[in-house]
Image (spheres, rainbow, N blue to C red):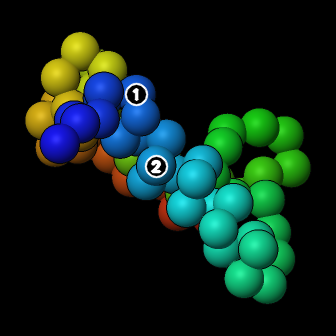
Amino acid sequence: MKRLKSSEALSTGTRTAAQVAGRMGVEGNWGTVGTGNRADLILLSANPLDDITNSRSIDGVMVRGQ
């Protein structure tokens, strides 16, 4: 079985999931950070690209830009 790289795992949980939701009829700009996109973010104290378990080191959460 092939293991995902950290970057692939993050993309699968964000950008790819948003693309699938869009195909299912969910409207909105989801899954990437950019002007005009919806802003639900987690702020991490360590880089998840170095080690995917760093995605658990949550320092803050932003929901709908707040």
Q: Mark 1 points at which residue?
A: 7
Q: Is residue 22 above or below residue 35?
A: below
Q: Is residue 28 above or below residue 42?
A: below
Q: Foreground: 4 or 6? A: 4
Farthest residue toward the front?
1
Q: Foreground: 3 or 40? A: 3
Farthest residue toward the top?
50
Instruction: Give the residue drawn at x 22%, y 35%.
Output: 3
Q: Where does the C terminus fall, quadrant-wise?
A: bottom right
Residue 30 at x, y percent in the picture: 69, 58
Mark 1 vs 2: CB contact within 8 A: no
Instruction: Give the residue drawn at x 60%, y 48%.
Output: 15
Q: Foreground: 4 or 46? A: 4
Instruction: Give the residue drawn at x 23%, y 36%.
Output: 2
Q: Can residue 65 be seen in this view?
A: no
Real-space Cα distance between discs 1 and 2? Answer: 9 Å
The quarter of the displayed image where residue 5 is located = top left
Q: Mark 2 points at which residue?
A: 12
Label 1 environment density (alpha carbons within 10 Å; few <14, some 14–19, many ≥20): few
Instruction: Give the residue drawn at x 46%, y 49%.
Output: 12
**Kind of residue sitting beneath label 1:** Ser
- Please indicate whether residue 50 sits to the left or right of residue 28 in the image: left
Farthest residue toward the right?
36
Residue 19 at x, y percent in the picture: 69, 60
Local secondary structure at mark 1: helix
The quarter of the displayed image where residue 26 is located = bottom right
- Please indicate whether residue 56 sits to the left or right of residue 34 in the image: left
- Please indicate whether residue 31 sits to the left or right of residue 62 in the image: right
